[in-house]
């Protein structure tokens, strides 16, 4: 990332989801030095569940980093943060991330109400789509919490998003949501699906 680049950091700090804007200052050790990052007015001293997003000013392409570590540093009494991780790049110039089918059973809460069972059709770095079974009514702008398991032996994925469209998928009612926040586990899962599709092995 270039000096002066504005970035958006999504993180879970002390069990709370936060978003913050920062500016890249310079390369530092195995990452980059950035302006201080705060969550609820408190400097983030150490965080391992986070992602960094920035936009290429020339192409408009979105880039996402899975953060390996976000930590604070102090130089002569001035606070900064250092961030390091692996880059994840969206795959086309329309600012839409590639989708990967998973067809997993999941549960959703609409606007915090009673949960409903759905089938997660596909996932991407920007959002996901699920088939509803017609039991619940979804409207554009609704807040939806989605939970599903990667497989029988792995942990639960838990994300929240906003309904962006309601449509038909193979004759069934379906809903597409734009993600508002997601964990490092979700990013890793999407990248695993990408590698499976490409036939390339990546480390989780």
Image (cartoon, rainbow, N blue to C red):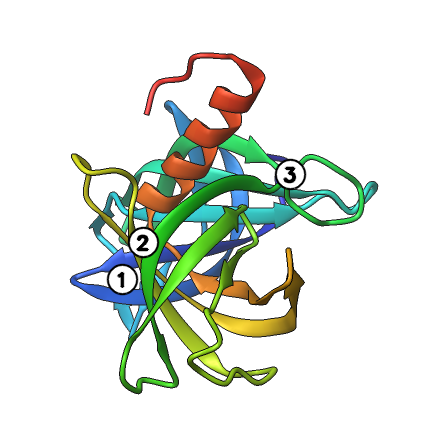
Element under disc 3:
loop
Q: How many residues crowd mark 1 within 10 Å: few (<14), some (14–19), many (20+)?
A: some
Quarter of the image where one finds residue 114: bottom left
Coordinates of residue 75 in the picture (x, y in percent): 31, 44
Coordinates of residue 152 in the picture (x, y in percent): 19, 38
Element under disc 2:
strand
Residue at horizontal 37%, vertical 47%? Answer: 104
Q: Nearer the viewer, residue 204 or 75?
A: 204
Residue 156 shown left or right of residue 180 in the figure: left
Residue 56 shown left or right of residue 163 in the figure: right
Residue 178 versus residue 95 in the image, above or below: below
Comparing labels 3 and 1, the label whose residue is closer to the camera: 3
Find out whether the residues at labels 3 and 2 contact each other: C-beta distance under 8 Å. no
Location of mark 2 (residue): 79
Coordinates of residue 188 in the picture (x, y in percent): 38, 35
Find out whether the residues at labels 1 and 2 contact each other: C-beta distance under 8 Å. yes
Location of mark 1 (residue): 43
Location of mark 3 (residue): 90
Who comes first in sequence, dot 3 or dot 2?
2
Image quarter where the C terminus lies is top left
Who comes first in sequence, dot 1 or dot 2?
1
Residue 67 visible in the snapshot: yes
Q: How many residues crowd mark 2 within 10 Å: few (<14), some (14–19), many (20+)?
A: some
Residue at horizontal 42%, vertical 79%? Answer: 135
Quarter of the image where one finds residue 166: bottom right
Residue 75 visible in the snapshot: no
Q: Alpha carbon of mark 1 to alpha carbon of mark 2: how far?
A: 8 Å
Residue 142 versus residue 104 in the image, above or below: below
Residue 52 versus residue 175 in the image, above or below: above
Q: Nearer the viewer, residue 39 or 51?
A: 51
Q: Alpha carbon of mark 3 to alpha carbon of mark 1: how far?
A: 30 Å
Coordinates of residue 50 in the picture (x, y in percent): 35, 48
């Amino acid at each position: 990332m270039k000096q002066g680049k504005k970035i958006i950091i999504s993180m879970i700090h002390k069990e709370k989801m936060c978003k913050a804007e920062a500016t890249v200052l310079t390369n530092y050790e195995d990452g980059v030095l950035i302006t201080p990052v705060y969550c609820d007015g408190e400097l983030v001293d150490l965080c391992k569940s986070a992602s960094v997003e920035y936009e290429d000013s020339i192409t408009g392409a979105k880039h996402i980093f899975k953060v390996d570590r976000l930590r604070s540093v102090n130089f002569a009494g001035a606070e900064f943060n250092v961030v390091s991780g692996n880059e994840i790049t969206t795959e086309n110039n329309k600012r839409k991330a590639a989708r990967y089918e998973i067809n997993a059973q999941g549960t959703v809460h609409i606007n915090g109400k009673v949960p409903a069972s759905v089938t997660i059709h596909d996932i991407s770095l920007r959002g996901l789509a699920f088939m509803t079974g017609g039991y619940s009514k979804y409207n554009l702008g609704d807040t939806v919490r989605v939970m599903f398991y990667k497989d029988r032996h792995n942990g639960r994925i838990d994300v929240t998003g906003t309904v962006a469209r309601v449509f038909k998928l193979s004759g069934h009612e379906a809903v597409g949501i734009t993600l508002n926040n997601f964990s490092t586990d979700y990013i890793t899962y999407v990248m695993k699906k990408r590698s499976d599709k490409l036939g390339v092995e990546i480390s989780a």
